[in-house]
Image (tube, helix red, strand yellow):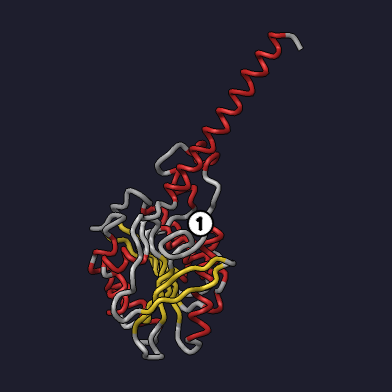
Amino acid sequence: MDAMSRERWLRLAIAVGFAVLLVTAVRSFVKHATYPIPAIEVGPPPAGFEEVFWDGGGVRVHGWHGGTDDPSRPVVVFFHGNGENLETLKWSGLLERWRELGVYAVAVEYPGYGRSAGSPSEAGLIDAGLAALDWATERWPERPVTVAGWSLGSAVAIQVAAQRSGAVDGLILMSAWTRLFDAAAAHFPSLLVRVLVRESYDSLTAAGRIGCPTLVVHGLRDRIIPAAQGERLAEALGARGRWVPVDEAGHNDLLGVGRVWTELGAFVDERAGG
C-alpha cells in the first residue's frame, strides 16, 4: 500500500470513528431526554402509605402503596411521567388525590429512578409494571384493578394492561402518545428520529389487545405530546375507549385541572360498580 492509499484509509478510519462517536453521543442524549431522572432523593412515603420492593425482571424496584381497605373499591396501579419519581409525587400531593377518590393506590418507581436498581429501558419499565400489577392482584384478588399512567407512564400502563388483560378491569391513559417515534417526530426530523430512537413504546398496537374500558384524557394545549395522538389512540380502542379532551390544559398542568379528577373519580366509581 503506497503512502497516498494509507493516508486515504487513515482519513476514512478517522471519519468512521468520529461518526460512531457522534451517533453514540446523540443516542446517549436521546436516552437522557427519554428518561431525565430527577436528582431528587426519595425519602419515606407520605402518611398512610407504605413502601414495597418487587423483583421486576431480576431488578429490585421500589414502590409505595396505601388507601382504603374497602374490598369493593379499586386498586389503582399508577405510573408517573419520565421526569418524576416517588418523591416528586409526594411533593405534588398526587398520591393523596388518588386516595381521595376512595381507591387503594400503588405507585411504581422505574428502574434507575429513586431507590429502584438498574437503569431505565422499555423492557425494564414494563417488567417493573408487571411485577407491581402481579403483586397487587395476588394481594387483593377480590378487588377490581385499574392501571393508570401519565405521559411516559401511559405508554407503560397500556403495555402492562395488554400483557395482563385478564387481570385488569380498567385502564386510564393521560397525555398518551401513539408511539415513541410519533412523539419524537412531532419535534424533530422523522429521518433523524428513525435513526436514533431505538425503543418503540407502541401504544397503538397495544390498544388492539386491550379488552377493558379505557379512559383517554388529553390536554388540547399539549405542546409535548399532541392531543391528536391521544385521540387516535382512543379511536384505536373503539368502543372500549372514552376520549376526554381538556380544553384548558397543556401537558404538565393536566393533573392540576379539577375536571380531570372528576372524570377519574367517575371512572373508578364505575369499576367499583358505584
Splitting the image into 4 quarters, where does residue 266 fall? bottom left
| Residue at the image position 30 percent from the left and 75 percent from the top | 46
In this image, 195 relative to 223: left or right?
right
**Residue 4 drawn at (x, y percent):** 68, 8
Q: Nearer the viewer, residue 20 or 1?
A: 1
Does the rendering let one see residue 25?
Answer: yes
Q: Which image quadrant: the N terminus?
A: top right
| Residue at the image position 54 percent from the left and 52 percent from the top | 200
Q: Which residue is mark 1?
A: 119
Does the rendering let one see residue 231?
Answer: no
Q: Is residue 217 above or below residue 139?
A: above
| Residue at the image position 23 percent from the left and 69 percent from the top | 258
**Residue 208 drawn at (x, y percent):** 55, 64
**Residue 13 drawn at (x, y percent):** 64, 23
The amino acid on which the numbered mark 1 sits, given as a three-letter code, is Ser
**Residue 142 drawn at (x, y percent):** 48, 89
Please state the total of marks drawn on the protein image. 1
